[in-house]
Amino acid sequence: KAAQHRTASSTLHFGARRCRRLGKMFVGVVAVGLLVHAGFSTIHLKGLTPISSPPLDVVIEVCLGFLLAAAASLATMPDLKRVKVTSALAPELEDKAFHSPDFIAFNHRGRSLAKRRKQLNK
């Protein structure tokens, strides 16, 4: 009985998570629908009358669509993972890795440019 209870509980838990995920996806679909409708209504209104700025209902629709899209995007993102802070724990390893004497270059174009400038000035 205990095993049956666990499977039924996990199935209900999975169903609740699935329902929440579908709700978040629905909010995203509604947001995209609002943005598309605002675009089409603006194109339609520009075809009917020459307008210089979009009407207030289109502006409100775009703002609402943007806010819903941002909320759906943030709600459906996965959990953040912990970052290991190795540089604070071992600064000498970072120094050895990024400041190796094998990669230090002392030559640059300054010497060759100075020679070229002297030749041009002669």
Image (cartoon, grey):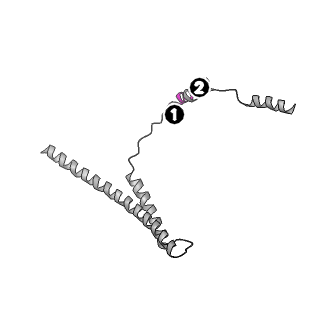
Apparent side of residue 103 relative to residue 87 in the rendered image (left or right): right
* Residue furthest right as drawn: 122
Quarter of the picture holding the C terminus: top right
Residue at the image position 45 percent from the left and 67 percent from the top: 40
Residue at the image position 41 percent from the left and 61 percent from the top: 32
Apparent side of residue 13 relative to residue 105 in the rendered image (left or right): left
Which range of residues does the magenta coloring cover? 90-95
Q: Is residue 68 magenta?
A: no
* Residue 39 image offset from top left, x and y in percent: 47, 66
Three-letter amino acid code at disc 2?
A: Ser
Measured along the vertical axis of the image, is residue 7 above or below residue 36?
above
Q: Which residue is mark 1?
A: 87
Measured along the vertical axis of the image, is residue 27 above or below residue 113?
below
SS for dot 1: helix
Q: Nearer the viewer, residue 22 or 8?
A: 22
Residue 83 found in image quarter: top left
Label 1 CA crowd tier, 10 Å (few <14, some 14–19, many 20+): few
Tag 1 and tag 2, C-beta contact below 8 Å: no
Measured along the vertical axis of the image, is residue 88 above or below residue 30?
above
**Magenta residues, dominant SS class:** helix
Residue at the image position 51 percent from the left and 30 percent from the top: 90
SS for dot 2: loop
Label 2 CA crowd tier, 10 Å (few <14, some 14–19, many 20+): few
Three-letter amino acid code at disc 1?
A: Ser
Measured along the vertical axis of the image, is residue 78 above or below residue 72?
above
* Residue 111 image offset from top left, x and y in percent: 76, 28
Quarter of the picture holding the N terminus: top left
Q: Which residue is mark 2?
A: 100
Q: Is residue 32 visible?
A: yes
Which numbered disc, 1 or 2, marks the residue that appears first in the sequence? 1
